[in-house]
Image (spheres, rainbow, N blue to C red):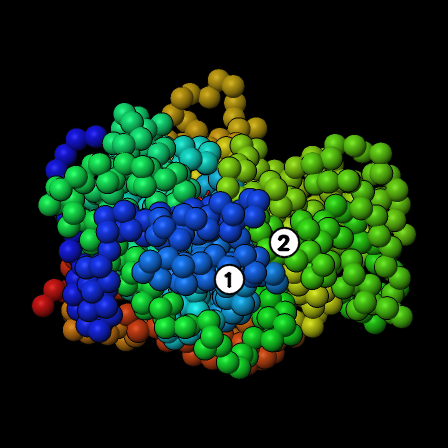
Amino acid sequence: MQGTTKISTNVENNLDSEIEQRVTALIGRMTLSEKIGQLNQLDASWGHPPDYLGPRIRDGGVGSILNTADPAIVAELQRIAIEESRLGIPLLTGRDVIHGFQTVMPIPLGQAASWHPALVQRASRASSAEASRAGINWTFAPMIDVTRDPRWGRVAESPGEDPYLAGEMAKALVRGVQGESLDDPESLAACAKHFAGYGAVEAGRDYAATNVPPNEMRNVHLRAFRAAVDAGAATVMTAFTDIDGVPATANEHLLSDVLRDEWGFDGMVVSDWDSVRQLEIHGFTDSEATSALAAFKAGVDMEMVGESYSRHLEAAIDGDATLLQRLDNAVANVLRLKFRMGLFDGRAAARGQTEWTAQAITEVSRELARASVVMLRNEKNTLPLEVDRLKSVAVLGPLADAPYQQLGTWIFDGVVDRSVTPLTALQDALKGSAEVRYDQVFETSRSRNLVNLSSAVNLATQSDVAIVFLGEEAILSGEAHCRADIRLPGAQEALVKALAACGTPLVGVILAGRPLALGAVAECFDALLYAWHPGSQAGPALADLLLGQASPSGKLPISFPVMSGQVPVYYSQKNTGKPATDDTIAHIDAIDSYAPQTSIGMTSYHLDAGFRPLYPFGFGLSYGTFVYAPTRLSASTMTGNDVLRVSTTVKNEGLRSGDEVVQLYLRDVAASLTRPVKELIGFQRVQLAPGESTDVVFEVAAKDLGFYGPRGRWVCEPGEFHIAIGGDSRVELSERFTYIEN
Ligand code: BGC
């Protein structure tokens, strides 16, 4: 590891002078090893942690612990820190509260599918309240890595493919986690992760290299982080990955130049799990000591496990004034957070009344699960099912009654007993009116054993409707759980085809941690609900939708490929010099073997998959039928001081009420860096009764037209823009206006 040490200074504006005085005074009393101790985060997940962590904490060698949520253990470790260490500095107690604590909310990708930031914020508030009761004060969430690769297992944790939607989710999640104030006993410190570009891992294979050039980094990957920091995220976690040769955990440009100097972040940076020592494995450093120094100099304040800081920083610093200054800066970042959280001031004791009763947490979990479901098909209004007319319902499939699987990935503290499965919920809802006949068919989502196929088909044949619950078990997505072939696993496609052939209306409900490639089976379903992993309340939420107590209102936060090989396929692609159109493509089956080379279209597409996804970003059906009037603009030109009003009228011409997510897309036609063919720049959720209409207005300012330009600065360049409002990313950008610089 080569290079100079650049010490970033925090922007002073937001600093609370009383806290800063306390931080400075405390640092003045600390020994070198106590300072380094504050940068050390240790694992408390095994054995009896007070035995092996107690002495270290007592000696001032630990600033934070992670991975225990046992209230008695957490309290004991905290007590040792406060009462028995020389300076009484409390611990940050970290936990992956990723989508719920004991009551599990939908996976983050599902939450993003709700396009409902206010509800997402409430749910994350509920989870923070629940976790705080176990003594947790820091969550490693939100994960806001934009990704266009559903093969990547961590797509389940991500907000999907779009920087703007990801930014809105980031803000909502940070606000939910941290509440009005960090020292509220129900607030946790948030952690925006993984900084940055992790979602671009090659081939969707976890931990693989990322090659993210500056334009892509700024305009795609960093935007949600900027939103999280602006919303006050207390901490940021570095990514495991190598970015174009410089691993994120030693990336001075990102951690110092961008995060600190440019964005004015005054919180704390933590590494990912042992990612400091992994710098050597990456081939960026040649020893544990140089790894520690590289991460430390680049701007990682706290090391998550690994302990290379504890082992090597003292010797490395050895009177070096610059490194000592960096040390005080890192320690200040840790202590400032602890003061802001009120940890020195008896925060836990201050707990009072809470709105987050067990029932309130369950209710928000059900509401968000309902809002996260995306209806992908509904031929001949198969859904909602008319309960009065149903005599028998076949409930089939490996995920109909799988209390653990419906929770999804990252549920360390999820209580499986709180799961209500779709089978149970449908049995309850239909009790006394229709017979529910159940067949699991496959032991797991991966089973290839077709032995139960014919009995399942018989059950479907004899029933008024068949609802088949398919998808992926929880373990097939999440960290390090990537798939190269993202079709329905096992023999599920065969089941779908067999059920489709039997003539009974077929409703598919897919529970999965990623978009699956459904090209081979989508049309077999009369209706199809995509439920992600919905969490504890999967059953009630899905029964509400299937039986028409509520209308589906989710929209896809990520495009669904026709087949795995089409990945990445996303709506905000660049136009290329040879964009495909329906007239310029040929299908592989229709090509003459001797067709001259250029005769089948010289445009950008796959012979076997075309150029469109199976289901586009922003797409989702409802029981309402929403019709959009042409987009209206308040002017055909705008300057930097103007606000352009972009509006439409949306009418529900259907027979049922529902929520519609109204979306605003823009294109900057020519710019100094090529811009995507379309970019989401706003959305609003409206609720419309049958026959009702409403005007939806977006106010667009010059800042909404901009992008990070060639020098990494936000620019808004004069010229022509295309814009329109619609119900998904296929909307044609029919309106034009010119932006004139003043
Ligand atoms: C993950 C992080 C997580 C950490 C602690 C790592 O493997 O990448 O997202 O917060 O473990 O559990």
Q: x, y percentage for residue 479?
A: 50, 41
Q: Residue furthest top?
A: 594
> Along the line of sight, which residue is nearer the eye, 474 or 545?
474
Amino acid carrying mark 1 in the image? Ala
The quadrant of the rendering that contains the N terminus is top left
C-alpha gap between disc 2 and disc 1: 28 Å
Please give the name of the residue rendered at 87% of the width and 65% of the height, measured from the top-left corner: 434
Label 1 CB, ligand 1: below 8 Å? no
Q: x, y percentage for residue 691?
A: 58, 80
Please give the name of the residue rendered at 41% of the width and 73% of the height, measured from the top-left corner: 346
Q: x, y percentage for residue 403?
A: 71, 54
> Along the line of sight, which residue is nearer the eye, 160 or 740?
160
**Residue underneath mark 2:** 407
Amino acid carrying mark 2 in the image? Leu
> Along the line of sight, which residue is nearer the eye, 503 or 275?
275
**Residue underneath mark 1:** 75
